[in-house]
Image (cartoon, helix red, strand yellow):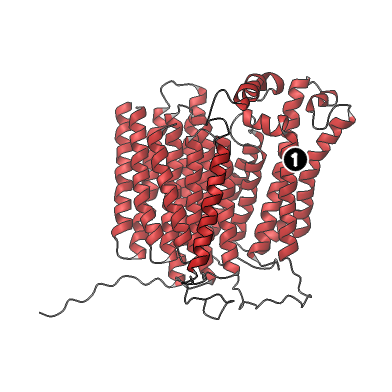
Amino acid sequence: MDSFFIGIGVALCFLMLLTLHRAIHGPTAIDRIMGVNVVGTKTTILLVIIGTIYHRVDMFVDIALAYALLNFIVTIAASRYFQHHKNLSPRGYGYRFRREDD
Amino acid sequence: MDIVVIMLTVAGVFLFFATTVGILRFPDFYSRMHAAGKGDTLSSLLMLLPLVLYNFHELNLANLLLAMKILLIGVFIFMASPTATHAIVDAGFEAGAKPWVKKPEEEA
Amino acid sequence: MIWQLDISVLSLIVLCAFATIMVKDLLSAAIIFGAYSFLMCLLWTEMGAVDVAFTEASVGAGVSTILFIAAAYQTTRIVKPRKSGRILAKILGLAAAIVMGLVLLAAETNFPGFADPGSPASRHLSPYYITHTLSDTAVPNMVTSVLADYRGFDTMFETAVIFAAGLAVIAILRRFKHTGRCELPETYSISAGYQDTIIRFISRQLVPFMQLFALYVVAHGHHSPGGGFQGGVILGASFILLAISYDLKLVMNRLNEKWNILLGNIGVLIYASIGFICLLMGANFLDYSVLSKILPATDPVMARSHGMLGIEIGVAIAVMAIVVTIYLNLASHGKLDKGL
């Protein structure tokens, strides 16, 4: 069973690589927020799987719970950003203070 | 018991594979969010359940506590992940993401 | 050590690191840096260092990303354009980095090998901690006992450094309405708090459980991964969740500025005063075994465990107050009225 769980872990890592392609290459910032949310949820699962491989799940469950909490908070905070700055991609180059439509 | 664990885990990974294909191939932010929100939550729940069942090789109090803790993670993901999906889609709508429109076919 | 997972997670981490540098948008770079932190925590866990993984998850992946987003909210998302040309400066920079790296590599050959069982640390120090922790302090978690008992001085100054960081943020950012000197260009009016029923309801339901979980992490640090720092950061993150889903006024009603600074003080004070009580009873500073004279029905071994719990509580209070202070000051640009 151990090698089965290791195989599942490697498969999850490969699928997270594909999701990271969307997180890096996504044309807007909101696609990246979505990609990081998915990566965060899957990392929680991967933590419990690593605990099962080491045969000591009781040590890893607390970390997984804290992870899920913080993933949720980061996603809500990143979405809150767009309530005020209604602009999906930053415009123009150069360093300046805020303009009207930034 | 091991057969059930293996089948549930493979089902969860397959669902996550479908989610990833959806995230990569859909043309529009809103449809990608459909795939990400629903598929991600369900595959997480489907992958936590066999880990709960795998611990029941012997039935004592510590294992019962552990099973309840992992189920607590499952309940939390069930509550929080759809809310996060809702928050992201709301932010995308407020920021002005445009839905994908099918191009009209040209006359022959 | 599972080498298959090691290689796959490491390649993901390198990919995230490259992407953080090369993305031309500060908000997206902050978010990808959050993903980098998540994967780094996974790597620590896979190596077996669960306490470090817990701290990285709570501080790096949670609070740091939110602070970056709050900073990008108050300033700008635009990156300076890359200037082409200046080839000579770039070559000189690269040569300096390579020379520094070679110097460090040459110095590294004098160190004992990686995980060498014959090195001085593995021969004298680690076996002492491994064999004597349970009999000296009655605490099974070796990391907590080394952090809070055998190396208690370092942890006290770490807590003082966290308090100093909070003070630095207040000193730099805090501004009041009547000073007219450093007037940065004001933004147009930030709208009232975003009102979304679903997020408000879920946050209201989740915050009590988050705080209970944080207190569990603090109290259970003796037997499972956890301790004062991690519990304090999760407590602070619960207040940040309230501030995000409602507005800053709600958190300011509960933890206004005076109480934040006071709680930061009280945390460090609890730590130092436990050490001073030990000094008053005639032993060294932070030697908890003499606390058995004032605590009822404990022997010197259990008194060390109770002393460790006391200082963990102090650390948690200080860290919670400082995390909330830094977030409030960053998100509202010093004015503490409305923000992210």
Task: Please give the count of numbered marks on the rendered protein.
Answer: 1
Please give left or right for residue C308 compared with residue C213 in the image.
Answer: right
Task: Locate residue B90: give its quadrant.
Answer: bottom left
Please give left or right for residue B85 compared with residue C80 in the image.
Answer: left
Q: Nearer the viewer, residue C252 or A44?
A: A44
The amino acid pointed to by label 1 is: Met
Quadrant housing the C terminus of chain C: bottom right
Q: Residue drawn at (41%, 48%), measured in percent from left and top? A: C12
**Is residue B33 shown above or below C108?**
below
Q: Residue drawn at (72%, 27%), measured in percent from left and top? A: C305
Q: Position of residue B48 (x, y in %)?
A: 41, 38
Q: Chain of mark 1?
A: C
On the image, numbered disc 1 is attached to which residue?
A: C156
Quadrant housing the N terminus of chain C: top left
Q: Nearer the viewer, residue C93 or B22?
A: C93
Task: Locate residue C313: give its quadrant.
Answer: top right
SS assignment at label 1: helix
Q: Nearer the viewer, residue B105 or A20?
A: A20
Q: Is residue C142 visible?
A: yes
Q: Residue drawn at (72%, 64%), measured in percent from left and top? A: C172
How packed is label 1: few (under 14 Cα within 10 Å), some, or many (20 or more)? Answer: many
Q: Is residue C245 visible?
A: no
Q: Position of residue A49 (x, y in %)?
A: 42, 35
Please give left or right for residue C161 compared with residue C107 in the image.
Answer: right
- In the rendered image, the residue lying farthest to the left is B108
Q: Residue drawn at (73%, 66%), measured in percent from left and top? A: C174
